[in-house]
Image (cartoon, rainbow, N blue to C red):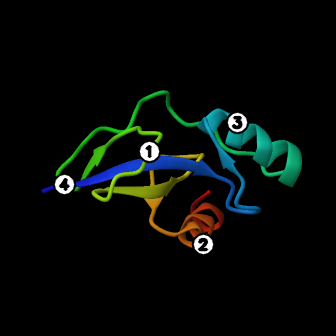
Amino acid sequence: MPKLVDIVAVCFECNKKFARPQKLRIHLESQHFITIPERSRARRRNNDNFTYVKTSTMHASIEEQFGCPACFQHYEVIHELKNHYYVDH
């Protein structure tokens, strides 16, 4: 059964949370001088491992994960996202 996941936009440098990924990209560029590569306008698609949900209230069966602002990867802990960004982008 796929894991229910809510992808959140959180800065991997200062842990500030944003309502929209675009706001995170602007923040990273203006506050941390990190230029984020463009990514396609496609959306994450549900698959055998994950079902993506968007919710303002957390439920016990929904796991919050940190989404990469440059690609569609996501991670359970913020430092894994930071490592991914600096290694892969």
Q: Secondary structure at mark 1?
A: loop
What residue appears at the point 56 percent right and 65 percent down from the top-left corner? 84
Residue 20 at x, y percent in the picture: 60, 35
Residue in front for this viewpoint, 37 or 52: 52
Q: Secondary structure at mark 4?
A: loop
Tag nearer the camera, 3 or 1: 1
What residue appears at the point 55 percent right and 52 percent down from the top-left corner? 68
Residue 82 at x, y percent in the picture: 63, 66
Q: Is residue 77 above or below residue 4?
A: below
Q: Secondary structure at mark 3?
A: helix
Q: Is residue 75 left or right of residue 5?
A: right
Q: Tag count in the figure?
A: 4
> Of label 2 and label 3, which has the lower sequence position?
3
Residue type pointed to by label 1: Thr
Q: CA distance from mark 1 to mark 4?
A: 20 Å
Q: CA distance from mark 4 to mark 3?
A: 29 Å
Tag nearer the camera, 1 or 2: 1
Location of the C terminus (image quadrant): bottom right
Question: Residue at label 3?
Answer: 23
User: Marks 1 and 2: CB-CB under 8 Å?
Assistant: no
Callout 2 crowding tier (Cα within 10 Å): few <14, some 14–19, many ≥20: few
Q: Which mark is residue 79?
A: 2
User: Marks 4 and 3: CB-CB under 8 Å?
Assistant: no
Q: Is residue 28 left or right of residue 30?
A: left
> Of label 3 and label 1, which has the lower sequence position?
3
Question: Residue at label 1?
Answer: 57
Location of the N terminus (image quadrant): bottom left
Kindly give the residue lying farthest to the top in the view shown. 41
Residue type pointed to by label 2: His
Residue 12 at x, y percent in the picture: 67, 61
Question: Residue at label 4?
Answer: 2
User: Marks 2 and 4: CB-CB under 8 Å?
Assistant: no
